[in-house]
Amino acid sequence: MGSVALPSNPWIETPLVESSALSKSAGCRVFLKLENLQPSGSFKSRGIGALLKHSLLNHHNPDIVHFYCSSGGNAGLACVTAARTLKRPVTVVVPLIIKPLMIAKLKNAGVYEVIQVGANWKEADSHLQENLLQKDEGGVYVPPFDHPEIWEGHSTLVSETARQLNDQGEEGADAMICSVGGGGLLCGVLLGLERQHKWTKDCKVLALETEGAESLNRSLQQGELITLPGITTIATSLGATRVAQKAFDLARKHGIKSAVLSDAEAAMGCWRFADDERILVEPACGVNLAVCYDGRLKMLLPELTPQSKVVIVVCGGSNITLQTLMAYRDEYGWIERETTSDAEVPSTLSAPPNGVTEKK
């Protein structure tokens, strides 16, 4: 084990806030776990940060460690942000399709070097593994979701939530909601719940995906891990064609509820959440919030009552701008025809009558 003196965890404790608007809309008590406030802007600060810290603590010479990551999305940003806190360099290798906005965010976060190569993630990752990592004595590979230390890092979200609920005089949650891409967050949530013996048996887990990235849902339906032929959703942060084996195993063990929403619903969750809570999130997170509107949550979990406590992981994400959100509303505004006006839910009043555009 190295002798490096590490600072505190490269993630923070995030607020747990009960939302009046979403509670009114959903018909139960909705608590928001605001992971969008993590240093990187997403929950991945926990898992990636835990992996980086573990790697340094167990490296024979922490002073030479150089991290390598092939994610140009939230995992890459979390890696750069955590490594900066831990005072180690990170090289991020991304495919040529990554937008300039994300490259700018990586540079702003303090990345050591960004290399763009290859037509897709697989080609970028192969370049990292073959041409960079193997030639660096201190090189440490950082996967985006499939690693035990990442799951352990994410599990801190649950223990933190349990303590915060207790501090608010609440015994526990009746349900937790999170979205699923590769399954790292889901693994953390389920592992964390296993340790909350006082309320884990009564806490339902609702795992959400979007159409075009529903690898977990299809796997559960078929009873075995499957690989999607491709990703066709705007929620690109959920774009894993195959979930981690551990996520699949834990999902089956705990009998979670898996559901799939459309891109239009995920986008709607983004703009209505912005109207209700003044918080900007990307569609990979918006899908979690969309279930609170227009009766979706009651359809998925009909056993919930007005007194039920539901914790939504507001996972955050950096792949969103105001311009993008407005473009989503232009394209998918037709879904607002389903909105029922309620004077106590701001986003039902801000929706234009009969939607914005015709369905395309």
Image: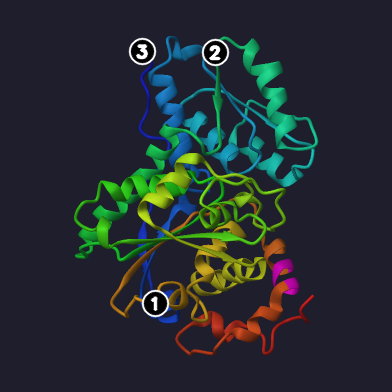
Q: How many labels does the image show?
A: 3
Counting from the top left corner in percent of width and height, residue 258 is at 49, 61
* Badge 1 density bin: few <14, some 14–19, many ≥20, Cα 10 Å: few
Q: Is mark 1 on a helix, strand or loop?
A: loop
Tell me the CA gap for discs 3 and 1.
Answer: 51 Å
Q: Earlier in the sequence, mark 3 or mark 2?
A: 3
Please, which residue is most extreme toward the front here?
223
Give the residue displayed 58% in from the left and 85% down from the top. Answer: 339
Does residue 348 appear left or right of residue 98 in this picture? left
> Which of the numbered marks, if any, corresponds to residue 302?
1
Q: Kindly indicate the quadrant of the structure image that contains residue 206.
A: bottom left
**Circle 2 sits on which residue?**
138
Q: Which of marks 2 and 1 is nearer the N terminus?
A: 2
Tell me the CA gap for discs 2 and 1.
Answer: 52 Å
Q: Kindly indicate the quadrant of the structure image that contains residue 324.
A: bottom right
Name the dominant secondary structure of the magenta segment: helix
Give the residue displayed 74% in from the left and 42% down from the top. Answer: 98
Magenta residues span 327-331
> Which mark's residue is nearer the viewer, 2 or 1?
1
> Which of the numbered marks, if any, corresponds to residue 1?
3
Q: Are marks 3 and 2 in contact (CB under 8 Å)?
A: no
Residue type highlighted by circle 3: Met
Residue type highlighted by circle 2: Gly
Q: Are marks 2 and 1 in contact (CB under 8 Å)?
A: no
Residue 329 colored magenta? yes
Give the residue displayed 54% in from the left and 13% down from the top. Answer: 138
**From the viewer's perspective, is residue 187 above or below residue 313?**
above
Q: Are marks 3 and 1 in contact (CB under 8 Å)?
A: no
